[in-house]
Image (spheres, rainbow, N blue to C red):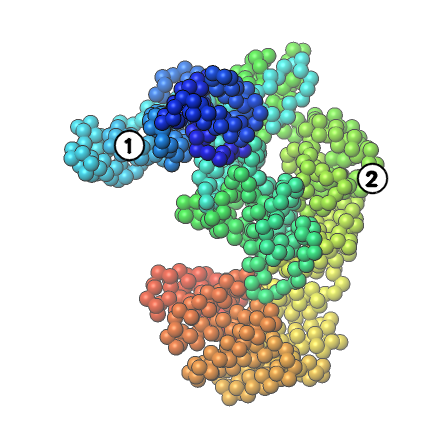
Amino acid sequence: MPLTMDTRKAMALLAYLAVNGGQQGRDSLAALLWPENDQTSARAALRRTLSVLNKALAPGVLTITRESVEISANASLWFDVEEFQRSRKECASHGHAPNEACPRCLAPLEQAAGLYQDTFMAGFTLRDSPAFDDWQFFQSESLRRELVEVLECLAHGYALQGHYEQAIAHARRRLAQDPLHEPAHRQLMQLYAWSGRRSSALRQYQECARILERELGVSPLEETTRLYEEIKDQQLAPLAPTPDQPWHVSHAPRPLHPADDRSITPGEYPLVGRGIEWSLLQQAYSAVDADGRLAVLEGEAGIGKTRLAEEFISHLREQGAHVLAARCYQGESGLALATFLEALRSGLEQVRSSQWHVPLHDQWLNEAARLLPDLAHLRPGLQSAAPSQDGGAQMRFFEGVHQVLRAMCSGQAPGMLFFDDLQWADETSLDLLTYLVRRLGRWPTLILLAWRSEDLPQTARLRRLLAEAQRNDRATLVTLARLSAENVNELVSMASGGAVAPVAIGRRLFQETEGLPYFLTEYLAALPEIVAGDEQGEWDIPQGVRDLLHARLEQVGEAGRQLLQTAATIGRSFDIDILRSASGRSDEETVETLEILIRLNLIREAQLAAGGLSADTPRGWVYDFTHNKVRSLIYTETSLARRRLLHQRVADALAARARGRPQGRALAGQIAYHYRQAGNAGEAAIFFFQAGEHARSLYANAEALAHFQAALALGYPEIGCLDEAIGDLYTLMGNYPAALNSYAGALAPLGASANQNARLEHKLGSVYHRLGEWGLAESHYQAALQALEEDSDTARQARLFADWSHTALRRGHPDLAIEMANQALNLAEKTGDPLAQAQAHNTLGILARGYSDLQTAIRHLEYSLALADKSGEASARIAALNNLSLAFADGGDLDHALQNAHQALELCRQQGDRHREAALHNNLADFYHVAGQEERSMQHLKQAVVIFAEIGASEGERSRAEIWKLSEW
């Protein structure tokens, strides 16, 4: 941890001892730091300072005698200057000239460059010690020259490998150290030209000439001018070929020998071929200061994204950083926010003993506790957050998760969030991830994402999010390629310890794996058996990963195979209680068998809570397969009858866990999935309905629709209720034909309930109103009114008349519209229902605006907005804000018009009402056009056109013209 000292002299003394090393005489130290004192008082001051320094340091760090002082050789102190010089010297053993850089040099040189953040002891001075200031100055100049050498080598080394962007970045930093150094200008010109940026190279010459003229009154050297002419005439010679040397990140390899019967797990092998990628991750993390950064690992399945990320996570944790990690799983994209649930539980375990949550406001803990109720236990007496459907609910929920993650990541070093396999993320997790990435400003955290390139099309949301962050200069993309034959040979050589012929094995392994790291490490894990077979003349390398996994699975025994089948059926990380309950094994058998599976590197364990499972398991450990392909193979080869039995057991175990617990609804999706796979349609339907309700509470409309549809297909008994819920979601999504079918289907079984029939007829009328089918809308409103007169629901009648008034206005009957609006207001005021009153005032505001009575219109609409806030109904709030914006615009008050329209648009996006979102974009386009901001106007217009084109049309049907005319509602 960083040292803190009370006096500047103590800091100066420590720096002098650390940099100079060895024994330093007391007299010389006293004269250096207290030059104006006599020898006696100077030595007394030195004794006091040594006492201060000793208290700040651990015991035994300083070796102090009567005549000398030094830092002990075995002291556990870390100095950036010492580490900087050690990284530089590491390259001296690579067998080339000091001013050159081979591929293996780049990682240590990157580390050295990253350590040099500012001049030596920047901002520090001793006013009464000129000798120390002189020493500090010369050390600073010496280190700066060393940095220049490092940057020059990095620029040249990356250029030789064809990585010009990294080379240019280092060359520019080198030039910043001395803008008058012409060779640095020439190097940057060459790099720009070789990378295809000829115009930048020519501009660099012009910049060089300008600086030299301004500072020295001279022209560039002939050599610099000649280079300029070569670039201008496109005659610059190409760079020398790339040296044929493998990349690696140095780790101490464990020798692999036939006599060694201990299995080596793939995670123990050194990272090979990932030097550049490692450096890019380090650069991204080093760039985190007051603001955060986004980094992305992209590549095909098995390319080593997770392994690289895990190594980097370990590296950061060693530096004291808090890292929260979670992953997504194939086939579980319908489980809303499961990834963030896992991340929160990971953080809760990681920072359990600290007081990280103390500064958090109750509101943010409450909001995040919607997703992870265990958070509420951190603060006794914290009241649970009440369900909310108002327009800002999702924003508050997202901000609550943001604030909790922010607090969990805070520490002595910048924190990191890591999300793996994001190609399988659910839509709501992507919404929340987008929210976090857009708020990296003033949040010193690295968000690291990993996804499979083949499963993520170029138009995917994640790619758009990355592109947005790159435009803001806040993102790093790291694309992982397959390993070369040289990389494979290098890894084999390091793993074999010379016991086998690495070239022959490497060549064969490269043929079998084609450089895919996961396959390669799996083959290397079997090398002892391969070598033993070779000695007997029976070496037979498996034909694929499947064969290799079969060979490893033969060692697990019957109990192990049964547990693996159960774990594969669970499908996600699992805890021991679910595994034991579903497998039918005893506690003792389960533990013993798990230990065998862990030793065979088929299962791994971690002391954290996995997503989708309870964080308060008695044992506190969770388990997962070491690779998803192991799980896939076992599951595929399990018989259908056994899979169904295991799915039933898993579902029963999860249902028992969920019963009576606050987080039980979050497990509903998993329970439903397992019941369906078990063939238990009835139970699956019930839990799919619960999962749909839970997804709706988290504003995950797409996931909610999928769950409701699954419940419907599996025979959920309350068909009418389900059809109505599906119709509501289809209406928000703008799929009006599907919404009409769902509402119509819900009518039939509800004939006995006048109120329910009225509600459905009202909703049918509202959909037809959106479609511009005014006659059909009024016929359904009429049917709804008849049902309500039977039921005497005055508040619902008021809401119906408010909507009907708007339809009458669109049909060209303004008098009828006014009559109905006033009738709606009278009924609403009788009942005191704020939602009905809000709708009535909203309609009266629309009518007043139609007669150009803007003062009356604004008064009604402001009433409507206040009542909508009171009711907590997002749709009413959106309508009032939109219509207020139109009224303000009519009156020439564009500032208030834009303000209200943007508020309405944000709420509409959260609610997911696509048609009204398009209308708001269209209105904003008109406002910005009037304001003379044509670029912003066109941006909103384009977005409106795209959404309008998707709304209301059946497959193969062109969108209705009336849909495009929506502006007020």
The answer, for residue 215, to whether it is visible in the render is yes
Amino acid at circle 2: Gly
**SS under mark 2:** loop
Horizontal relation, residue 118 to residue 277: left or right: left
Q: Where does label 2 land, which residue? A: 584
Looking at the image, residue 240 lies above or below residue 213: above
Q: Which mark is residue 178?
A: 1
* Alpha carbon separation for disc pair 1 and 2: 72 Å
**SS under mark 1:** loop
Residue 498 picture location, percent across and down: 57, 12
The structure residue drawn at horizontal position 44% and vertical position 49%, both measured from the top left corner, is 468
Looking at the image, residue 686 lies above or below residue 788: above
The answer, for residue 159, to whether it is visible in the render is no
Label 1 vs 2, first from the N-terminus:
1
Residue 460 picture location, percent across and down: 50, 49
Label 1, residues with CA under 10 Å away: few <14, some 14-19, many ≥20: few
Residue 296 picture location, percent across and down: 50, 41
The structure residue drawn at horizontal position 48% and vertical position 51%, both measured from the top left corner, is 438
Looking at the image, residue 365 lies above or below residue 72: below
Q: Nearer the viewer, mark 1 or mark 2?
A: 1
